[in-house]
Image (spheres, rainbow, N blue to C red):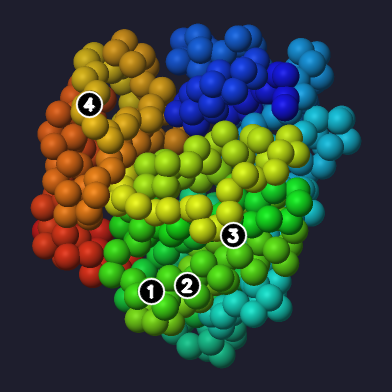
Amino acid sequence: MFAKLLIANRGEVAVRVIRACKEMGIETVAVYSEADAESLPVSMADESFCIGGPQASGSYLNMDAILTLALAVGADAIHPGYGMLAENAEFARRCEKNGIILVGPSAEVIESMGQKETARAIAKKAGLPVTAGSEILEDAEEAASAATELGYPVMLKARLGGGGKGIRVVRAPEEIPSAWEAVCLEAKSAFGDDGIYMEHYLEGVRHVEVQILADRNGKVLVLGDRDCSVQRRNQKLIEECPAPEISDGLRRNLWSAAEELAKAVGYVTAGTVEFLVKGEEYWFLEMNTRLQVEHSVTEMATGIDIVEWQIRTAAGAALPYTQDMVRVGRHAIECRICAESGKNFLPASGTVTMLHVPGGADVRFDTAVYAGCTVTPFYDSMLGKLIVGADSREAAIRKMKCALSELVLAGVSNNREMHMKFMEDTTFVRGRYDTGIAEEVLQRQ
């Protein structure tokens, strides 16, 4: 097992990794920007070092600073969290070159599955169904030709996209030029790569993902599935495990497809295979080669500590479970509490003047926020994740309503009330919703 681990991230995920390491007896090193000098991970870690200014480009994305520090403090491994450098193949290669283990799959897997058009080809070869799509497009004119061939509506997507960025739905030819320009600019800014491809856009679908965990011996475990269809601007708001209203046959097919893909690419540690689902049909969407924000609902539903086993498998430990031992015995729901204001849900900032975290059995609030902390405008707006678990979906919804009503987070505008609307919405409560539900619910507010 690792003796010392550096966390190359911030906020809630840094806190989550530090807690797991403390329980495993691993020393932790936190890195932070000047804006995060008073953050919770800084006080929790065994060692903490400032590596740059408030902009992520000069701190959390600064590979040279992170690797230099890791070598200086004698870190055995680096945990990238999610976002930031978590799916950066170059960073993975540089870690390997410097004799440091990155908690995640190999650089080759990150690169092949991170390039969406390559991932689609690999998935298709492994027998997974994929939506109709194009190769990398050169310009808006070529995009217009591809859209005509695929049939509208289509979706322009950044090859290295993630987190809802670098995506535009196009419904008519006249929308292509502006959508192309917007996706190129966003992709270049967010990922440093403006490679764009196109897929036929499926409407009325659900976004269902399968959590996997794999070790270096080739064992791949499926830790259930999650529904992530409640999304605004392609960013997830609510996740639940297991996905509701899915037949046993479809669930078996999704699990089998995720396992096959993981084995095909030689995957190690925690990862997620995402699908679009409509009726009994499903299509491969992408593979996330990292820990995901919503791993917490799977932990609540299965009782398996995904972060712990992500670290253990990265260190070479064999998984002690068999697939039969994995039980999704409960239902869990997660609401992402974000710093947002107004009807347009613009990012908010400020100082948290009061924080009351809900309690009780099977209630969890993963956060790095505390009373008196400052929420800055430099990073993602997520303040924390409220997770509940119960013996049934109906009970989980009731528990989430109770937890949301108890949560007090004053001083910074947030979306707690919006989540309460979902918990009371008939379509959501029935569990028969698709990716259009957020727009429908928010229009009724």
Which of label 2 and label 3 is nearer to you?
2
Are the residues at dot 2 and dot 4 in contact (C-beta closer than 8 Å)? no
Q: Nearer the viewer, residue 291 or 307?
A: 307
> Which of the two labelled residues, at mark 4 and mark 1, occupies the earlier sequence position?
1
> Which of the two labelled residues, at mark 2 and mark 3, occupies the earlier sequence position?
2
**Quarter of the N terminus within the rendering:** top right
Which of label 2 and label 4 is nearer to you?
2
Mark 1: which amino acid? Asp
Residue 273: name its quadrant: bottom right
User: Where 354 sits versus 437, above or below?
Assistant: above
Residue denoted by label 3: 287
Q: Counting other residues with Cα less than 10 Å from the Cα at mark 2, is it few (<14), some (14-19), or many (20 or more)? A: few
**Residue 341: x %, y % from top left:** 24, 36
Mark 4: which amino acid? Gly
**What secondary structure is found at the residue carrying circle 3?**
strand
Residue 8: name its quadrant: top right
Are the residues at dot 2 and dot 1 in contact (C-beta closer than 8 Å)? yes
Let me know if residue 52 appears in the view.
no
Residue at 19% x, 60% y: name it.
Answer: 428
Q: Counting other residues with Cα less than 10 Å from the Cα at mark 1, is it few (<14), some (14-19), or many (20 or more)? A: few
| Alpha carbons under labels 2 and 4: distance apart | 35 Å
Residue denoted by label 4: 359
Which of label 4 and label 1 is nearer to you?
1
Q: Could you say which disc has been placed on residue 248 in the image?
A: 1
Which of label 3 and label 4 is nearer to you?
4
Residue denoted by label 2: 252
**What secondary structure is found at the residue carrying circle 2?**
helix
**Residue 113: x %, y % from top left:** 68, 60
Let me know if residue 130 appears in the view.
yes
> Which of the two labelled residues, at mark 3 and mark 4, occupies the earlier sequence position?
3
